[in-house]
Image (tube, grey):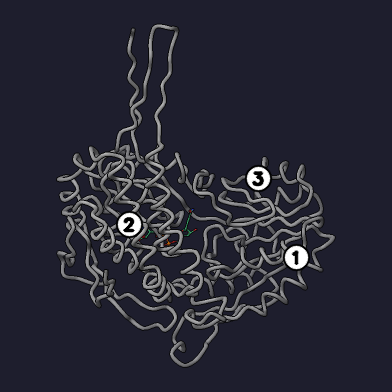
Amino acid sequence: MQLDIPYHLENFIGGNFIGPLSGQFIDNINPATGAVFAQIPNSNEKDVDIAVQAAKKVQHSWAATSLEQRFLILNKIAALIDENSEVLAQAETKDNGKPLWLSRKVDIYRAAANFRFFATGIMHFASESHASENKYINYTLRQPIGIVGCISPWNLPLYLFTWKIAPALAAGNCVIAKPSEVTPVTAFLLGKIAREAGLPDGVLNIVHGEGATCGEAIVKHPGIKAISFTGSTRAGAQIASIAAPVFKKLSLELGGKNPNIIFADCDWEKMLKTTLQSSFSNQGQICLCGSRILIEASVYEKFKKKFVEKTKALKTGDPMQPENQQGAIVSKIHFEKIMHAIQLAKDEGGKLLCGGNSINPGGDFANGYFIEPTVIEGLGPGCKTNTDEIFGPVVTLQAFNNVEEALELANATQYGLACSIWTSNISKANNVASRIEAGIVWINCWLQRDLRTPFGGIKNSGIGREGGWEALKFFTEAKNVCIEY
Ligand code: NAD
């Protein structure tokens, strides 16, 4: 199949590619060059409504489609993503600014894996049965919800888009999906792939547009019964305020300010290598990045010297070139937000150990959005730099003297998404893991993902869990049936 990227992207509704009813489009920019390379539909509630009407036509037939048939179609989508992985990776990098090697290795690989995982998962999904007092038997039906909304962010565009869509479809729902307006291209291409794979028209509808208009129209539409959202805590709160009074089922995966706790007795080289990745992968724009590095005081100076040395050696520039570990920041607005946060860190009294400036790689990239990986020390847990999410290549260092101090620093934010712990003392690691306020903990590793595990955060990092049975349970309604015999 041919996956071309037209200048005007279109919505994918009822199996057709159609422009926005308003005729209005939004510029789509390559962040490495600052140039407009496509335009996307500026969809509103009318476009969302025709998508819901298209889904309504096939909602019951898709719910009644056999598990094996759903498996075959979703598995075919996975195969087509694999087959077109190079085109998709190039598109992701052009749209997002992330290094091409990362798009290939992580984003596109994982998008296919998401479909494969839930295609097979639905074949094994079982519901419960409870026998009571030798007289009654209860069995639980897990039925599709109907039409669901999936809204995703720009940092891992196709990866997170498919992480929602795949379980929703596998569970027998029709989907109205909206990718980020900042990175719409691979979502557009997914529509082509779904059609080629034989997904019936109207089962998956992809509507492009801004959060406040198109996104909110999805959340508000009475025909859409559940919302799975990944994005900022700010937008998550707004969505919850609309969905809660009408009792829509909600899954919210929100922001983070994750601690990376380093004890003196860790495997030093492994920790150093992984900490560099957990700090700056994808220019620090992964919700799971460890942006607050907490170091046992006895090795603080040693860590600082080595870590700053390694950070300075990272190469930033054209994301298509394999030698660059760092690409562009996703957009001008986000670039300015990060630069503002760095200025704030200085104003708060932070000391920049390296980085802190924008970069101009010159040539075609002179107008791109590049920032030096930045390491800051000297700020306490109460500073905004250490409490607010920056979501860029910026980390802070803080020292601690013992486990209690480490926990106090680690838990000192409103977020609770993820945490890494580095120590060779497994009892200490388990003790910290059990007391940390986070939904995901890695011990002596980072970003190891088994798709069967529950994924999500606590506190301001969200509500609910994705992954494995958690996702299939979210995208189904449990109905208990009790029989006397
Ligand atoms: P964002 O909240 O601005 O946008 C996310 C998506 O929601 C986009 O598609 C956007 O158009 C839409 N949107 C925005 N406002 C909306 C509204 N009022 N109603 C409906 N839809 C709306 O987030 P972003 O800037 O795209 O992404 C970065 C954020 O995502 C960071 O905070 C990051 O931590 C978070 N994130 C969290 C996870 C996780 O799993 N917890 C994963 C990745 C990113």
Left or right, residue 412 beside residue 297: left
Residue underneath mark 1: 269
Mark 1 vs ligand 1: CB under 8 Å?
no
Disc 2 to disc 1: CB gap under 8 Å: no
Q: Is residue 280 above or below residue 292?
A: below
Rendered image quadrant of residue 192: bottom left
What is the distance, in whole Å, between disc 2 and disc 3 at their CAs? 38 Å
Give the residue drawn at x 51%, y 82%: 321
Sequence-wise, the earlier of marks 2 and 3 is 2
Could you tell me residue 135's position as x and y percent? 39, 6
Q: Is residue 169 above or below residue 390?
A: above
Residue underneath mark 3: 436
Q: Is mark 1 on a helix, strand or loop?
A: helix
| Residue type, mark 2 in image | Ile
Give the residue drawn at x 39%, y 62%: 158
* Neighbours of disc 2 within 10 Å: few (<14), some (14-19), many (20+): many
Residue underneath mark 2: 77
* Neighbours of disc 1 within 10 Å: few (<14), some (14-19), many (20+): few
What is the distance, in whole Å, between disc 1 and disc 3 at their CAs? 24 Å
| Residue type, mark 3 in image | Ile
* Neighbours of disc 3 within 10 Å: few (<14), some (14-19), many (20+): many
Residue nearest the observer in this picture, 169 or 219 = 169
Give the residue drawn at x 40%, y 47%: 118
